[in-house]
Amino acid sequence: MQILHFAKRASEWRTAVMVRDEFLCQSQRHADGCHDRVLVAHHIVYRSHLSKRSLWIVENGICLSEACHRLAHATHNVSVGLARANEAVAAVNCVESIPVPRFTKKGAR
């Protein structure tokens, strides 16, 4: 049984993701300029795929630098790592009635 952590709003979700990841970029494949001090909380399963019930699941977040955040979107989350991406999918699928597809090695869904 997977234990999920839910935030009530965006600011609470962002803080929970940042604290869990110790305010460090968690990308598996860092982009040029990754050491920027500006960090963002990124939804691994994109917000457009989520219902209101699963929007603020902390396990679906990852702390990234701005450069790595752009890379995550450009590579459809391949840069965050397959294991981390599929953990987020599993968390979201605990809540969603229509399962989100798992990530593959190539990042295609």
Image: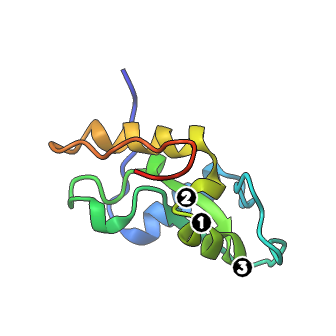
Tell which of 103 and 28 is nearer to you.
103
Residues at badges 2 and 1 in contact (C-beta under 8 Å)? yes
Which residue matches tag 2?
A: 77
x and y percent of residue 98 in the render? 17, 45
Q: Earlier in the sequence, mark 1 or mark 3?
A: 3
Q: Earlier in the sequence, mark 2 or mark 1?
A: 1
The residue under the point 62% across, 71% down is 69
Vertical placement of 53 versus 90: above or below? Answer: below
Q: Tell me the element at label 1.
A: helix
Q: Nearer the viewer, mark 1 or mark 3?
A: 1
**Residue 96: image tag:** none
Rounded to the nearest angstrom, the CA distance separating label 3 from label 2 is 19 Å
Whether residue 109 sits left or right of residue 63 in the image: it is left
x and y percent of residue 39 in the render? 67, 73
Whether residue 108 sits left or right of residue 35 in the image: it is left
- Name which residue type carries label 3: Val
- Name which residue type carries label 1: Ala
Instruction: Name the outermost residue toward the left.
Output: 97
**Residue 72: image tag:** 1
Rounded to the nearest angstrom, the CA distance separating label 2 from label 1 is 4 Å
The residue under the point 28% across, 36% down is 94
Which residue matches tag 3?
A: 38
x and y percent of residue 59 in the render? 47, 46
Q: Tell me the element at label 2.
A: loop
- Name which residue type carries label 2: Asn
Q: Quadrant of residue 79?
A: bottom right
Q: Earlier in the sequence, mark 3 or mark 2?
A: 3
Rounded to the nearest angstrom, the CA distance separating label 1 from label 3 is 15 Å
Q: Residues within 10 Å of mark 2 (few under 14, many from 20)?
A: many
The residue under the point 78% across, 63% down is 30
x and y percent of residue 63 in the render? 63, 61
